[in-house]
Image (cartoon, grey):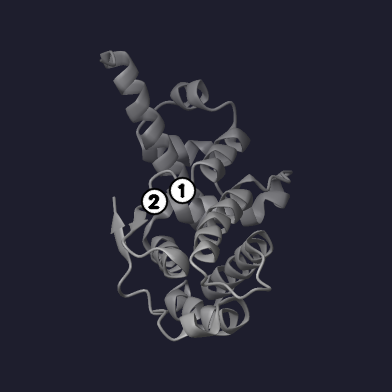
Amino acid sequence: MPRPQQERAVRTRKAIIRAAAEEFDLHGYAGTSTTKIIKKAGCTMGALYFHFASKHDLARALMAEQAADLPVVTGRGGLQGLVDLTFVLARELQSNVVFRAGVRLAVEQGAFGLRDDSAYQLWITTFKERLIAAQALGELSENTDPAGFARVLVGAYSGTQLLSEIRTGREDLTERIAELWSYFLPAVAAPDVIGRLDITGDEAEVTA
């Protein structure tokens, strides 16, 4: 069993990550100070630097861990499972501050000297795996390459969520994702599959 000191360190790190996420989400990298983070986390500067070497290191950790507490999409598989996942991610962007902050930092990273595509590669791999499963079920058109479309989908999704953030604070994000699929599905799905796919996201099932 973990010792009390280890448990305390885990709790402190989680509190720092949460506080940093709230600050980065509101103010971006440049507008966030470590002083505000430790005040919100209820810890000392020494505790912060015990876990993270710098604000830069903390931002990288948030980018890397953005998907750590996301729910798992269950239930429907194949291409429908991928569609469901994109709607679950949209709702998480509306409600999950750690995920939202990690995404914002990934977009802004050039401003603090990073060129790290790890977060994007995570989603490219995740989407590709879903597409390979759909291909095995005969749900993709013959010309659809799972790896290629996964890259395109991540790029399009990233731009769509960013535009939604700028225009409506992501209030219309699920509608914009439905619109995205309405254009993509005729290009990548087998014709007999399109009509039976739900692109509302209303039936997506998740587990915490």
Q: Residues within 10 Å of mark 2 (few under 14, many from 20)?
A: some
Q: CA distance from mark 1 to mark 2?
A: 5 Å
Question: In the rendered view of the protein, which quadrant contains the N terminus?
Answer: top left
Determine the secondary structure under disc 2: loop
The residue at 50%/52% (across/down) is 101
User: Do we see residue 29 in this rendering?
Assistant: no
Determine the secondary structure under disc 1: loop
User: In this rendering, is residue 86 above or below 15?
Assistant: below
> Can you identify the residue that label 2 sits on?
70
The residue at 40%/43% (across/down) is 18
- Left or right: 1 as drawn, with respect to 78: left
Residue 79, x across and y down, in percent: 47, 69
Q: Are marks 1 and 2 in contact (CB under 8 Å)?
A: yes
Observer-nearest residue: 16 or 205?
A: 205
The residue at 63%/50% (across/down) is 121
Residue 80, x across and y down, in percent: 42, 70
The circle on residue 187 is none
Observer-nearest residue: 65 or 53?
A: 65
At label 2, which amino acid type do we have? Answer: Leu
Residue 112, x across and y down, in percent: 70, 45
> Can you identify the residue that label 1 sits on?
67
- Left or right: 98 as drawn, with respect to 189: left
Quarter of the image for residue 159 reads bottom right
Residue 181, x across and y down, in percent: 52, 79
Observer-nearest residue: 187 or 114?
A: 187
The residue at 42%/35% (across/down) is 16
* Number of numbered discs: 2
User: In this rendering, is residue 182 above or below 148?
Assistant: below
- Left or right: 59 as drawn, with respect to 208: right
